Amino acid sequence: MPLEYPRNAAMAAVDAGIEQVTWNVAVVESLDGRNKYDKKTAQILKVLEQVGIDAHIHKVLPVGRAARNLRRYFQREPLEGPCTADPLLGNDLTNPQSITVEPSAEVDICWNLTIGNAKEKPLSQIIHEYNWRENPIVRTLVEEGPISLAKNAKGINFRLQERRFINKCHLCIEIRKTLKESEL
């Protein structure tokens, strides 16, 4: 297993004094899961255990290839209702406690839910000026949920086929991806 790169990167971060260095681990079911993916993940973590950092465990999101290839592992959930939190970080969209800065400098509060670009505006300003009520997409997600976002999308090529989506996050990511592509 070629794990020397992540091991070296993590050790360098720890040696540099960076706080809260963790492995970001996605599982299908759990680290004790019986499927081949979770078994392999547990093996990898066992090898990396010697680095001495904790693992942040979260479930694989049903998007992209995971929605196709791992569908049998996901339990379908209702699509109705507002978004409550980011599926990975548990981030509340009304008052996010963490962000992700993508390589493109886009600042995300949820999976590809951008609130600004750090190349265009200082990060501190983006964070300070964030108001969920002023962002039409975030506002719809908070107040009504992604199914409303999908039903109200005008002028884009998106058909709401409810059986196609595993949960609200899956629907939300797909509708926002389609909205973003229609802007290009």
Image: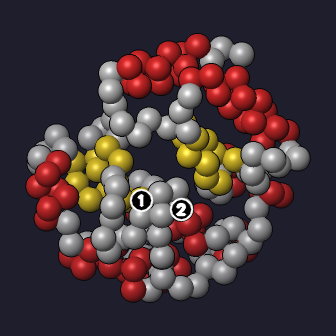
Identity of the residue drawn at 33% across and 65% down: 96
Give, as a three-letter code, the residue at label 1: Cys
Residue 147: where, in percent of width, then height? 53, 80
Res 183 → quadrant: bottom left
| Relative vertical location of residue 21 with respect to residue 114 in this rendering, above or below | above
Q: What type is the residue that disc 2 sits on?
A: Pro
Task: Give left or right: position of 70 versus 167.
Answer: right
Residue 109 location, quadrant? bottom left
Residue 184 location (% of width, % of height) = 33, 51
Q: Secondary structure at mark 2?
A: loop
Q: Nearer the viewer, residue 87 or 102?
A: 87
Describe residue 79's horizontal placement relative to residue 109 as left or right: right
Q: Residue at x 26, y 59 (%)?
A: 115
- Residue 138 sits above or below residue 65 on the image: below
The answer to which of 97 and 171 lies nearer the viewer is 97
Residue 150 visible in the snapshot: no
Q: Where, quadrant-wise, is the N terminus in this rendering?
A: top right
The extreme right residue here reads 34
In the rendered structure, which disc, 1 or 2, sits on the residue that comes first in sequence? 2
Percent position of residue 19, x then y = 36, 36
Mark number, residue 82:
none
Residue 110 is tagged as 1
Mark 2 sits on what residue? 87
Determine the CA span between mark 1 and mark 2: 8 Å
Q: Is residue 52 visible?
A: yes
Q: What is the number of callouts on the image?
A: 2
Residue at 14% over, 62% down: 128
> Are the residues tagged 1 and 2 within 8 Å (C-beta)?
yes
Q: Residue at x 38, y 19 (%)?
A: 15
Residue 154: % across, % down: 40, 76
Specify whether 27 is left or right of 34: left
